[in-house]
Amino acid sequence: MKLAVSLVMLVAAAAYAAPAPEPTGPHPRIVLDADLKAAWHAQAGLEHGPVIGSIKLCANARETHEHDAGVYRGSEWVKVLQACLVAWVATDHKEDATTAIRFMTALLDDQDKIGDGKGGDDIVRHDDGYPIRMVGPYTAIAYDWLHELLPPALRDRARSRWKSWLAWYRDKGYRNASPGTNYHAGYVFAASMMAVAQGGEAGGDGAKLWRDVVDTMWGRDMAVAFTDDGVLAGGDWPEGWQYGPLSVAELALGARALRGAGAKINSASWLDDLLKAHVYGLTPNDRVFPGGDTEEESSAYLAVSPLTLDAIALGDASPDDKRWARGELSRLQLVDVDWLLFDALAGVGDKPQLPPRASWPTWYVATAVRTIFARTTWNADAIWFVAKCAPTLDVDHRAADAGNFALSRGKDDVIVDPSPYGTQSTLTSNAPTIRSPQLPKNYQPGQAYWSTKTGFELLTQRASGVVAARCDYADQFKFQERASDIPEAVRDLVMIPSVDKKDAAVVVVDHADTGGDDRALYLRFRTPGTLVASGDNAGATVGSTKLTIQSVAHSSGSPKIAKTALKDCFGETVDRGNCDAARIPVTDYRLELAGPTPRAVHVIGATGANTAISAAPLSGTDWAGVQLGGMRDASVIWRTKGSGSITYTAPPGMHVVLDAPEKDGKATVTAKPAGNNCEVAITAGGEVRSLPVIVTLDATCKITPDLEVEAGSTAPALTKPSSSHVRSPRGGCCGAQGGPSSPTMAGAIALLWMWPRRRKRLKKR
């Protein structure tokens, strides 16, 4: 494995970091050229836009003292400095340059108020180095753009500050070599802008910084992050989209500036993924799936940040991607008054165009974070489905929630993940989890943070709109270097839409071998609706959508409907592993299943008020399943014992066979009438796509394969089962069947519970 990683790094380094000399030419060097200047001059005559906004903000900062306070580590001064730089380029007014120099000086020397002299060399040491993304890159851009207007002493002081800041961050800064984190993005952006700005003017220190930036930060770390196996593959931001927008904008501008200075930086493929991640990650109501920590308390989803699209439009993306990003900015009417430089750069280029969604596939896999986004159509009333199944990533702000999913019907978000900021509990999401006695008691029954084998075993969308995913999360209970003590843990998710693709049923099949009677499986489904119980089932109304949760079968326990009073998991009396807090009001459907072989099948419906979904168990000698009716006739089948060929009986309609035999991913399917049902036989090899087999059988049992549709991404390599033994069969529909048990861990846990540190940054206003 280490050899493979080394080879990837060598190949990436060779591709991205061909030797480039330190820039020594005239200023400006950072993106500012005649074309950009002409474009901003033209936009200065418009009534609205980031250039006009910059001119007005700079004038206000010059004429008042409203912006003299730095707010958070100079964030207010950064906002004004950006605005004044844009204003100066757009108008050539010297007073804008003078105002820019005033705020540049404040960032170099001050901390809280302009002129307090409390900043300087030590300013970046606050908050583990976070301020470097504030004070570093924008003073460097000002140094470059205003170079001839700056007093020599100020230029000297700027270079001295940069040397001190970078030396400290290189030695002690948080996440200084961890791509995919917001701290790293800010550090790389700062170092890149400084290296270009001071090129040829900082002696040996400057030359060393240039090589470090080009060869190490971009030629090694970022080059690997951009590969198909890298932490940024697929375009999603691993920490989630509270932290992603500014980070991707910084990386895009940094890459563009370095390429303009002669470095071989190729970010176009990543920016293409970023655009797709934006498009597919939007709910039908144009909100963003958070994917990680968020403090949003008004909705399960986030508002779209213009910075995400700015990154594509201002970066080295393809011409189409740039036009489409500008089209999205225009369609969503997005502006960002805090980061006017990014908005202004993004506003220069070809006429905006909307992405051609209607011609795109309807599913996408964000590969690094192992998240599938799927929808039935590109219409506003589509069904939208997301599911996660990722191993531990070396980033912050990610929950341990393999098997988590969410579901929307048009603008109605019916199953949501309301996890609060900083959650370390799986129970705040919709992911299944198991009580593992080898984890510290305060963190049971949550999943842990050391997995390497977790992932989807199957993942597909078919022409009918059916989505099938199998998440193997047994490795989520690995504890540091100790192997997982949970032999098997699998969740199957099958989303079956109606024929018109406006309604859907999600079949959730949970099965595990927990290794002990006292190791329960915990399930919950969380909704913003108010659930009302009806026996083992429950229902709610969410907007114009009828949500139903039907328990087809479960091996033990009784479902409960509950609400949490907690909004976060930081209370002194809260155990972190079983906290059930929610940042928005939700109702939970909860079920606890005793070990050692818990089984459960649920059908979650999202339909119009007058549409019903029926669900009933199916079973045979070596197979089981669930039969759906009402909205659509369908059967989902799985094996309970044995291997090889399988024969089962089910009514006509759509059939999804999760454990179908296969050879080279293909199978042969035959069927014949059996009373009112069809007797179906499946053998390995043939012409029908397996893993799973999805076919439609008419009233005469004639078979029509449901063809797989192309994904909007290169689908990731599917994981192999993480269990070291042959899986125990899923007895009946949910039968309790014995399986191998793990020895109980003796003695108390002596190791410390070293969860990844969670860092907040300035909240976007």
Image: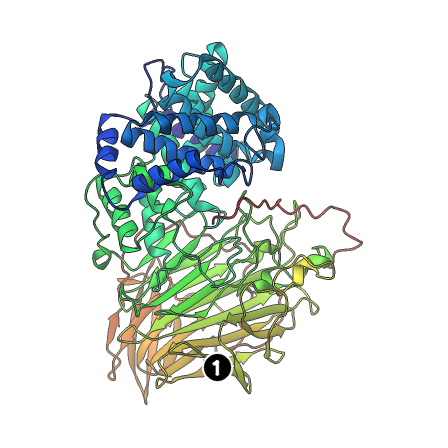
* Residue nearer the viewer, 697 or 388: 388
Residue identified by numbered label 1: 539
Give the SS element for disc 1: strand
Q: Position of residue 693 (x, y in %)?
A: 34, 67
Q: Position of residue 61 (x, y in %)?
A: 43, 36
* Residue nearer the viewer, 93 or 525: 93
Instruction: Please name the amino acid that badge 1 sits on.
Output: Gly
Which residue occupies the extreme bottom position in the image?
675
Which residue occupies the extreme top position in the image?
203
Which residue occupies the extreme right position in the image?
747
Q: Position of residue 306 (x, y in %)?
A: 36, 48
Q: Where is residue 413, by image quadrant?
A: bottom left
Q: Is residue 474 above or below residue 336?
A: below
Q: Is residue 759 above or below residue 650?
A: above
Quick check: 369 left or right of 161?
left
Q: Is residue 662 above or below residue 591?
A: above
Q: Is residue 758 above or below residue 686?
A: above
- Which residue is at 35% across, 58% downward? 663
- Which residue is at 52% across, 34% downward? 2
Q: Where is residue 233, by image quadrant?
A: top left
Quick check: 10 left or right of 162?
left
